[in-house]
Amino acid sequence: MRSGSSSAMLKRERVREHLRVLIEASRPGDAIPSERALCAELGVSRPTLRAVVDGLVTTGLLTREQGRGTFVAPAKITQELTSDRAPLDVPSASGSWSSRILERATLQAGARIGRRLRISPAAELVYIARLRLVDGAPMAVEHLHFPATLVPASLTSEELEAGDLYDHLREHHGVTVHEATQSIEPTVVNEAEAAVLDVPVLSPALLIERLTTDTSGRPVEYVHSVYRGDRYRIVSRLALGPPGPRPRPAGHHPGIPPGDFAHDGIITSSTTGDAY
């Protein structure tokens, strides 16, 4: 049976995905439908819809103009932290991590997630909302999406909560993950997330989205996670090229000023998560 907070989370997740599809199919400056129209279409209350829209406005996907409506925001600038030529090592985050399942369902993929997983919008996927804890304290809410053809809906809570999920998929379901593309951006927590993370509504957080592929390049997992901004940080360690005259690189490396500190390329980079 679903708890009140997890049911609210799934409802907001459905509204959020619908609006993300609208945003991705629109151009910057396009208006989204009115609150009345969206509530009628999605069968949700205005407070639920407004909570989701507020979150998308805060994260910069939508903008509001007083007396005119809500519009698709200008596209964000994307900056990679490492070069494709550089190896990427991701050490384990600090602390003792554990998991608790909040929600599990078999859903249709829909247009947006279907595109990411390269499956039909009508294809079934396994959706899991998982609370991640560090030393017993809530740290993050993960929304995981797996194609139902790869990951059985019969996965038990014990399987999902014990050990490393990727190890379990490899050992028991023949799914071997190989690489992932991940993005990180600031966000705020909505009402349902605040309830399970034990923080105030609209507290700062990190939104981490990840698409994972297997050894054949097939997408096997799409995840978006909300990490507490007051307890979690991302630390990158960069090893720069040897000193000496070299052509000035085009573009910008985040956090590395131009001039004497500019190098031709980043040789290595490692990223770690610190819970504190």
Image (cartoon, rainbow, N blue to C red):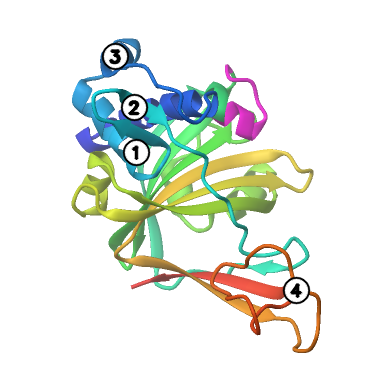
Magenta region: 113-122
Mark 3 and mark 1 lie on one chain; the one further toward the N terminus is 3
**Which is closer to the viewer, label 1 or label 2?**
2
Q: Nearer the viewer, mark 3 or mark 1?
A: 1
Residue 35 lies left or right of residue 187; in this view the side is left
| Alpha carbon separation for disc pair 2 and 4 | 42 Å
Please tell me whether mark 1 sits on a helix, a strand or a loop. helix
Mark 1 or mark 4: name the one nearer the start of the chain.
Answer: 1
Judge depth for marks 2 and 3 and give the one in front.
Answer: 2
Q: Residue at x 69, y 53 (%)?
A: 179
Name the disc covering residue 57, or none. Answer: 1
Q: Nearer the viewer, mark 2 or mark 4?
A: 4
231 magenta-colored? no
Structural distance between the alpha carbons of marks 1 and 2: 9 Å
Q: Which residue is mark 3?
A: 43
Q: Disc 2 and disc 3: Cα gap in Å? A: 20 Å
| Residue type, numbered disc 2 | Thr
Are circles 4 and 3 on residues that touch, CB within 8 Å? Answer: no
User: What type is the residue that disc 3 sits on?
Assistant: Gly
Residue 70, disc: 2
